[in-house]
Image: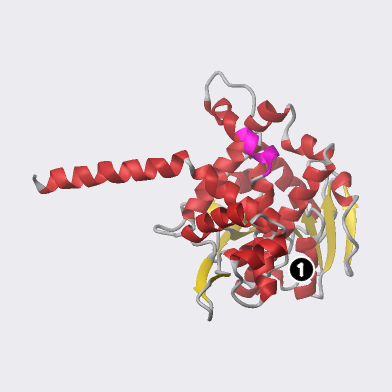
Amino acid sequence: MTGREEEEEDEEAQAEVDMWKYIFGFANVAAVKCAIELGVADAIQNHHSPITLYELSNKLGCAPSPLHRIMRFLVHNNIFKQKPIVDGTIGYVQTPLSRRLLGRGENSMESLFLLESSPVMLKPWHFLNDRVRLDGNTAAFEAAHGNDIWKYAAVNPDYSKLIDDAMACHARMDVPRMIERCPEVFDGIKTLVDVGGGNGTTLSMLVKACPWILGINFDLPHVLSTAPEYDGIRHVGGDMFQSVPKADAAFLMWVLHNWNDDECIQILKKCKEAIPKDNGKVIMVEVVVGEAKDDKLEFVRLTLDMVMMAHTDSGKERTSKEWEYILGKAGFSRHTIRPIGEVHSVIEAFP
């Protein structure tokens, strides 16, 4: 057998392995969601030492045998680890990955996981082809649920809370990193309007880190109806397609990717009208696709673009050229893009 033939045989063997992973990829999501809903990570964390299967089953109120099977699968996939205990039994311990499943952990991604693995968010993936076909005229989310994601959230409070909690989770991860890596972005800003600010978590973190800033949390009235009160922040209800409250700077985090180019241009024009012409700016935290080669997080950006296809009518993640286009059409004279070593970049646009 030649070297090329051996290589082709190895590729065929690997293809079969990889295809099995695709076929049963949903099992990873289901098992992790099961662990979150049972509270496995929190139970292990609160035990403060390796916890045996029977100790864990007692804490969770679970039957040992099926719990063992779930834990065996999660250990195999490096979610949790096993560690020998003094008497020779085996206990479960946390990993950096499992700590991201903690309900209140600093790096917890639990709320994001629960949103994206919810039945509401999973169903549109079965209609992704509707977004792609030439003869398709229905967005995937609308095909699945009969309404777009925003109208659906407006009449389903539990789902709306899932979105708010996921966005707050996202803010707790990204805001500290943004402030640490480019704090000068907020220098000289006395008033800041967070456009599409949800329940105010993002703005509260910004104001706490930059106490000289007075914040305006701006979102749809039904979103703000459950938002808590924060020192230094006032909630203002409205529609960003109609007008944006006046401030020194407008801030949009993970907002514009939900909309098509024309809608983004409309939103950005309203933001531009709300800031001073001489020293105002719009600050965006968004994905920029394809900026760096061999970036270990690029797969996340490309996956998020698929999420936009499944969950929005016309949203997408953009390249730097696409950001240049919509910012220019919105009337901004210049902009900067600052990669911060994360999934998202910080984009500043100036009148």
Q: Find residue 101 and report its image quarter.
A: bottom right
Toward the viewer: 47 or 233?
47
Q: Find residue 123 and report its image quarter.
A: top right
Any part of residue 190 in sight: yes
Secondary structure under tag 1 reads helix
What residue is shown at x 81% (from left), y 70% (from top)?
213
Tell me the quadrant of the picture where the C terminus can be found. bottom right
What residue is shown at x 53% (from left), y 49% (from top)?
28
Tell me the quadrant of the picture where the N terminus can be found. top left
Farthest residue, direction left: 1
Q: Is 120 contained in the magenta span?
A: yes
Instruction: Locate residue 271 relative to residue 228 in the image: left or right.
Output: left
Q: Is 187 contained in the magenta span?
A: no
Horizontal and vertical percent position of residue 74: 53, 57
Horizontal and vertical percent position of residue 127: 59, 29
Farthest residue, direction bottom: 86
Horizontal and vertical percent position of residue 283: 68, 59
Residue bearing mark 1? 205
Magenta stretch?
118-124
Magenta stretch prevailing secondary structure: helix
Considering only vertical position in the picture, is 8 above or below 167? above
Q: Amino acid at mark 1?
A: Met
Toward the viewer: 10 or 231?
10
Instruction: Locate residue 310 relative to residue 194 in the image: left or right.
Output: left
Considering only vertical position in the picture, is 269 above or below 213? above
Toward the viewer: 335 or 142?
142
Any part of residue 322 in sight: no
User: What kind of colouring is applied to the model shown?
Assistant: secondary structure
What residue is shown at x 80% (from left), y 70% (from top)?
207
